[in-house]
Image (cartoon, rainbow, N blue to C red):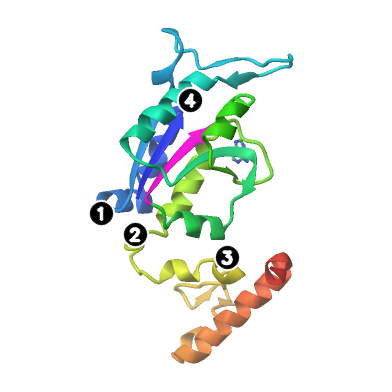
Amino acid sequence: MRIDILSVLPELLQSPFEHSIMKRAQDKGLLTVVVHPLRKWAVNEYGMIDDYQYGGGAGMVMMCEPLAKAIEELSAERKYDEIIYLTPDGERLNQKISNSLSLKGNLLMICGHYKGIDERIRTNYVTKEISIGDYVLSGGELPAAVLVDSIGRLLPGVLNDETSALFDSFQDNLLAPPVYTRPVDFRGWKVPDILMSGDHKKIEEWRHEQSVLRTKERRPDLLEE
Ligand code: ADE
């Protein structure tokens, strides 16, 4: 999979993909992430990419021209399955969306700043709008990093144990069960006996029970879906 990202702050997106699982995905050739500085398509030599909004009001708006030119130039090189704008008024990200995006070949992500991007770019180029939650961040870079991570780890071959993403929280609309590692007894706090029983069938049943219990307690809305 290839993911291109348009950003006015490309530096913000350097580190997130250079470590751990995202690094491994790229080293294995399963994922390519390319961050493009939007100012490359600025309207003047001062790097202008935003302007005051029509109708008045505080806050700048990202202009049509740099975005349109960037999208058109990148789209001439490859066909994008989705052009995604990260925005707090987009569809709220969940595991189902990440699962479905992980099946695509090429994605283009647009990070907004200030008051956001000119509505005409949303209408005429953007195919999907995603929010990572009901709170407002300073820009779309961290949301883009979240989205890339949640998609990247689902690509076949990225995780060591191919099945492990299947048991993540939210797959099957259930939260993950509690997990334990050594020692068996830490300051008198013990690991549940069942996990030491060696009875894999019983352990799986226990884990499922715990998942359901945890979901009922913490996220009953997931069980209603
Ligand atoms: N940009 C600013 N806040 C955001 C959010 N919550 N989700 C996606 N993009 C954003």
Say whether residue 115 is left or right of residue 23: right
Ligand 1 is in which quadrant of the figure? top right
Q: Residue furthest top?
A: 45
Helix, strand or loop for disc 4? helix
Q: Which residue is mark 3?
A: 170
In this figure, which residue is indicated by the disc labeled 4? 67
The answer to whether residue 8 is seen in the rendering is no
Mark found first going from the N terminus, 2 or 4 = 4
Depth-wise, is mark 2 or mark 4 nearer the camera? 4
Looking at the rendered structure, the kind of residue marked 4 is Leu
Task: Give coordinates of residue 18: x percent, y percent.
Answer: 34, 43
Alpha carbon separation for disc pair 2 and 1: 8 Å
Q: Quadrant of residue 163?
A: bottom left
Which of discs 4 and 3 lies nearer the camera? The answer is 4
Q: Read off the residue under disc 2.
A: 158
Q: Residues within 10 Å of mark 4 (few under 14, many from 20)?
A: many
Look at the image and say whether residue 106 sits in the magenta stretch. yes
For the residue marked with disc 3, what is the amino acid? Phe
Sequence-wise first label, 3 or 2: 2
Quarter assignment of residue 12: top left
Give the SS element for disc 2.
loop
Examine the image and state in which quarter residue 85 appears. top right
Principal secondary structure, stretch drawn in magenta: strand
